[in-house]
């Protein structure tokens, strides 16, 4: 594997690991601030990100590269509201989408079409995740400061998490 592709995948491994920690941090905040459904959703999202990280680790090692773990910054631990949490989730997912697009661009520049093909899974995943997060964010915005509405959204997040397919082993 070309070293430019290997380096860029390793940077993405770091981003996915950070995503997992960020959502774990958000889940903790939700759990401690009366949003058990949002907490369950974000704990699961944290596990998903760990799976995204591992999928890249295995791909890199299987293709003759070597996954390298890097140091991570401390994720934000305090939020002002559930709206604040999901605005930051949305912002982070947009950042991840841009980074995956950049990574895909590197594979094209380096003519590594096999890796480009592998990355299609992440491109599709980002479309789904952004759409899910946008829907949640729209609902939170709609209820505003209405406590009953917020309670209902939290229950909905709980039900969504309970109904979600198990995270596949990679
Ligand atoms: Fe949507 O975060 Fe991983 O790829």
Image: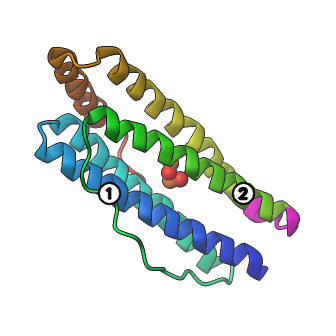
Residue at left offset 37%, top offset 40% = 165
Q: Which residue is mark 2?
A: 102
161 or 137, nearer to the observer: 137
Check residue 161 in the rendering and tell me which mark sits there, or answer none: none
Q: Residues within 10 Å of mark 2 (few under 14, many from 20)?
A: few
77 or 150, nearer to the observer: 77
Q: Residue 85: percent from the left, percent from the top?
A: 33, 41
Q: Residues within 10 Å of mark 1 (few under 14, many from 20)?
A: few
125 or 17, nearer to the observer: 17
Residue at left offset 79%, top offset 58% = 105
Q: Residue 86: percent from the left, percent from the top?
A: 37, 37
Q: Is residue 115 visible?
A: yes
Q: Is residue 156 left or right of residue 133?
A: left
Q: Is residue 11 inside the magenta stretch?
A: no
Q: For the residue with label 2, is its CB less than 8 Å from the closest atom of ligand 1?
A: no
Tell me the quarter of the picture where residue 87 sits.
top left
Q: Is residue 118 above or below residue 139?
A: below
Quadrant of the image containing the N terminus: bottom right
The magenta span reads 109-116
Q: Is residue 50 left or right of residue 81?
A: right
Q: Which residue is mark 1?
A: 76
Q: Residue 169: percent from the left, percent from the top?
A: 42, 60
Dot 2 or dot 1: first in sequence order is 1
């Amino acid at each position: 594997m070309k070293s430019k592709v290997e380096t860029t995948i390793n940077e993405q491994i770091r981003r996915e690991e950070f995503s997992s920690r960020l959502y774990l941090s958000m889940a903790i905040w939700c759990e401690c601030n009366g949003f058990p459904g949002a907490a369950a959703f974000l704990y699961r999202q944290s596990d998903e990100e760990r799976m995204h990280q591992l999928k890249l680790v295995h791909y890199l090692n299987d293709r003759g590269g070597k996954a390298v773990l890097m140091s991570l910054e401390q994720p934000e631990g305090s939020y002002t509201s559930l709206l604040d949490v999901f605005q930051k989730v949305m912002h982070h997912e947009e950042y991840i989408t841009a980074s995956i697009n950049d990574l895909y661009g590197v594979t094209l520049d380096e003519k590594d079409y096999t890796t480009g093909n592998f990355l299609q899974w992440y491109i599709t995943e980002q479309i789904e995740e952004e759409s899910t997060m946008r829907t949640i964010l729209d609902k939170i915005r709609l209820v505003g400061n209405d406590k009953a509405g917020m309670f209902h959204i939290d229950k909905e997040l709980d039900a969504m998490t309970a109904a979600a397919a198990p995270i596949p082993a990679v």
